[in-house]
Image: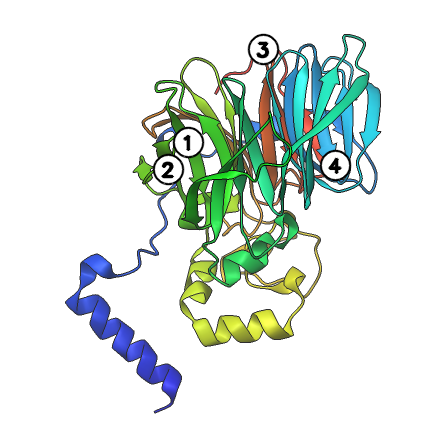
């Protein structure tokens, strides 16, 4: 009997004797407010650019700001026309806004930059503010204070799959000091398994909601720091950025859905280490933002095409999903792009007027609902 088999048997015995300490790898079903539909497939394309991947979106006054690589585009939400574009020295990791004129741009391994959006859609570049962040994933401006989620202290934002496959848990939430550019960020929470999104709890302005992506949950913690608690149940997908929704609701974007194959690989440490060290990340058994049709892509048997069609019940390695959640973790509605749709890999969401605007990085486009959004 080899060492791997011995470890597996010891783990099985330990899980049997101490079930409360066993790792929960069950995947909740999509039901209730998360019941599948094809609503995201019905959204209208608002913005797209060849060779560029939209990442984050925020609404500022009349305009929608779209981050893509090291650029920010100011887009008219009615026509999709780009009013102006600004290029930074480093890639943009996240944006936060007061919703009126001011935007804080969190660059990757570079200072945070303040921008002002004029009424004609042009940008005025202001001063840099405190701290350099290595892996900013989302940001929120709360009462004149800037809070930023960092996915990892080991990997950058584009290495999120490597962080998942190595079971990273170095994510954190920090407060950036706006008044003093020399002050280091204050750590609010740390030890998170990829902090993917952040938003204020509208029912309690002294608390923050944060997505802990690799643990498939949303957590709540005090804005001044302290322990975090899970909000609602574990999720069937990988939650990412958050945005304020109507009333007390929060909008949650999802990188993809969980699958049994990925959950199995996450339990097999030696296999996973060999995969990470010897195979191109594009072909890892892991979630992804898009499927390119490459013959080397891994899949579960249920994902095989029949009559050249991927069935809607197939295990989804890539999937498009945005959902609306109450502050207690209850989901009240959602917008899905079915399995096989190119509108997968949602990385950002915002509300512009009465419209829902979605950054679909997997589909390389920004989508908008037609008229007032409902779910």
Q: CA distance from mark 3 to mark 4?
A: 24 Å
Question: Residue farthest to the left?
Answer: 17
**Residue 73 found in image quarter:** top right
- Residue 35 seen in the current view: no
Residue 68 image label: 4
Pointer 2 with pointer 1, Cβ within 8 A: yes
Which residue carries the number 3 mark? 354
Comparing 182 with 106, the one in front is 182
Residue name at image x 35 percent, y 20 percent: 204
Which residue carries the number 2 mark? 219
Q: Residue 135 placed where, x, y %? A: 60, 46
Is 307 drawn above or below residue 188 in the view shown?
below
Residue 362 image label: none
Q: CA distance from mark 2 to mark 3?
A: 28 Å
Of tags 1 and 4, the one toward the viewer is 1
- Tag 4, which secondary structure? strand
């Amino acid at each position: 009997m080899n060492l791997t088999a011995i470890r597996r048997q010891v783990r099985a015995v330990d899980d049997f004797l101490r079930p409360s300490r066993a790792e929960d790898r069950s995947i909740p079903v999509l039901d209730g407010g998360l019941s599948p539909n094809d609503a995201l497939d019905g959204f209208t394309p608002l913005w797209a650019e060849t060779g560029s991947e939209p990442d984050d979106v925020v609404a500022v006054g009349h305009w929608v700001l779209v981050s893509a690589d090291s650029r920010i585009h100011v887009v008219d939400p009615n026509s999709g026309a780009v009013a102006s574009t600004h290029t930074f020295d480093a890639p943009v990791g996240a944006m936060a806004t007061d919703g009126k004129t001011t935007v804080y741009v969190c660059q990757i391994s570079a200072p945070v930059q303040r921008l002002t959006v004029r009424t004609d859609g042009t940008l005025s570049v202001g001063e840099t503010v405190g701290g350099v962040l290595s892996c900013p994933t989302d940001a929120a401006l709360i009462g004149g204070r800037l809070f930023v989620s960092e996915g990892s202290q080991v990997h950058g934002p584009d290495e999120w799959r490597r962080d998942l496959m190595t079971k990273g848990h170095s994510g954190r939430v920090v407060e950036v000091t706006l008044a003093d550019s020399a002050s280091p960020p204050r750590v609010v929470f740390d030890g998170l398994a990829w902090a993917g999104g952040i938003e204020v709890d509208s029912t309690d302005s002294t608390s923050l909601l944060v997505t802990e992506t690799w643990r498939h949950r949303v957590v709540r913690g005090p804005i001044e720091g302290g322990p975090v608690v899970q909000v609602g149940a574990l999720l069937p997908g990988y939650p990412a950025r958050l945005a304020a929704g109507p009333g007390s609701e929060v909008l949650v974007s999802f990188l993809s859905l969980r699958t049994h194959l990925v959950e199995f690989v996450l339990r097999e440490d030696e296999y996973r280490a060999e995969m990470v060290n010897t195979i191109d990340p594009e072909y890892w058994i892991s979630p992804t933002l898009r499927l390119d049709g490459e013959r080397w892509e891994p899949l579960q048997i249920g994902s095989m095409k029949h009559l050249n069609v991927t069935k809607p019940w197939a295990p989804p390695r890539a999937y498009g999903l945005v959902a609306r959640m109450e502050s207690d973790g209850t989901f009240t509605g959602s917008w899905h792009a079915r399995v096989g749709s190119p509108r997968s890999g949602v990385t950002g969401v915002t509300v512009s007027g009465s419209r829902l605007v979605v950054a679909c990085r997997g589909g390389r486009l920004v989508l908008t609902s037609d008229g007032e959004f409902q779910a």
